[in-house]
Image: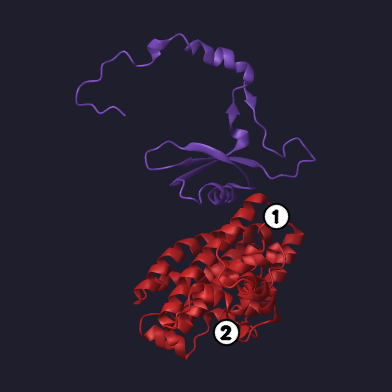
Chain colours: A purple, B red
Amino acid sequence: MAEQKASSGDGDATDTQWPLWEVFIQPKPGAPHEHCGSVHAVDAEQALLNARDVYARRNEGIHLWVVPTQWITGSTPEDVGPFFDPANDKAYRHPQFYKTPRGVKVY
Amino acid sequence: MPLSDFLLRLGDDRLINGHRLSEWCGHGPILEEDIALANISLDLVGQANLLLELAGKEEGQGRTADTLAYFREGTEFRNALIMELPRGDFAFTTTRQFLVSVFDALYLERLQNSKHSDLAGIAAKAFKEVRYHARHSADWMLKLGDGTAESHQRTQASVDELWRFTGEMFEMDALEIDLVEQGVAVDRTALREAWRAEVTRVFQAATLTVPDDGFMQRGGREGRHTEHLGHLLAEMQIVARSFPGAEW
């Protein structure tokens, strides 16, 4: 079952917080964007500026993404069994039976 | 010495502006903006540190950035008056930062070509920071000016109050004209049109009215300040003066 995360402010009249945005930062060229936290903002430009001020002021990266939290769909705790357990006994899914050829640098 | 006097102007503008912004620490409207204001404050104090250190070096009397920041009287400060006005409400602080940062970005962009290589280096570093300050405060001008009736009213009131302090940023005197001719400083009057165009562009989008240029306040460059600077200095300097030479 998928759960649509609501942004704060949705459906709760007592919550006066601005909408929530998730922040992803790319540490260096070619590296994947990693989730680093969230900020409140009323629009994308403000979310980007707040993300810069909160998460990118100590040389953490070179590129930022901000995504409205409400557009992120997460798996639920009940999904843990069906989603992740079947991976446990299928070692053949990992490419660990190959010999690394000489001359290839292993990272 | 003319060059160190000029560097004091640049350094004091940033030190006093930075200190005013630091007063928001812990009082920002939301956590993210609290951090943003402190970031901008630290950028400006960092720039002031470099500029005052250079001013002391050029002066050649052994004064450091700390000596200049903490052991000068109000009449010895050379910042423009707009920097020392009390922080007011968030609209006032934002409006001041916008007006100052737009000017600053134009000024520093050109100061990067200064023939004084240390100064050009400081300008290059500061220019990047100030472009962000201008973008950040412009975004807030849009949100406050084109926000609620109250935010619009407060922001327009701040614009009207601050406008008469903007003229001083463009003032040139014999000292700076001479330094412009030497290729060290930037002609402030030449930035007026570009500044006005950018301010007008943002104000229009923010449904704010650009005031007419009337009487302009001045005097900061000669050490004639508002009553507010003394109070600011009292707070900024008290620790250094109570415990001279203290380190932590």
- Residue B73 shows in the view: yes
Asked if B181 appears above or below B11 in the picture, the reply is below
Which quadrant of the figure has residue B202?
bottom right
The three-letter amino acid code for the residue at tag 2 is: Glu
Residue corresponding to mark 1:
B29
**Image quarter (top left, top right, bottom left or bottom right) of the N terminus of chain B:** bottom left
Asked if B58 appears above or below A65 in the picture, the reply is below
Which is more toward the observer, A106 or A85? A106
Q: In the visual, does B202 lie left or right of B109?
A: right
Asked if A68 appears above or below B134 in the picture, the reply is above
The three-letter amino acid code for the residue at tag 1 is: Pro
- Residue B12 shows in the view: no
Name the element at disc 1. Answer: loop
Which is more toward the observer, B242 or B89? B242
**Image quarter (top left, top right, bottom left or bottom right) of the C terminus of chain B:** bottom right
Among the two numbered marks 2 and 1 on one chain, the one whose residue lies closer to the N terminus: 1
Q: Residue at x 73, y 60 (%)?
A: B151
Residue at the far left in the pictured view: A103
Chain ID at mark 1: B
Q: In the image, are marks 2 and 1 on the same chain? A: yes
Q: Residues within 10 Å of mark 1 (few under 14, many from 20)?
A: few
Q: Position of residue B138 (x, y in %)?
A: 58, 61
Residue at the far right in the pictured view: A14
Residue corresponding to mark 2:
B76
Q: CA distance from mark 2 to mark 1?
A: 34 Å
Chain ID at mark 2: B
Q: Position of residue A27 (x, y in %)?
A: 43, 42
Asked if B172 appears above or below B21 in the picture, the reply is below
Name the element at disc 2. Answer: helix
Q: On residue B134, which mark appears?
A: none
Q: In the visual, does B69 lie left or right of B117?
A: right
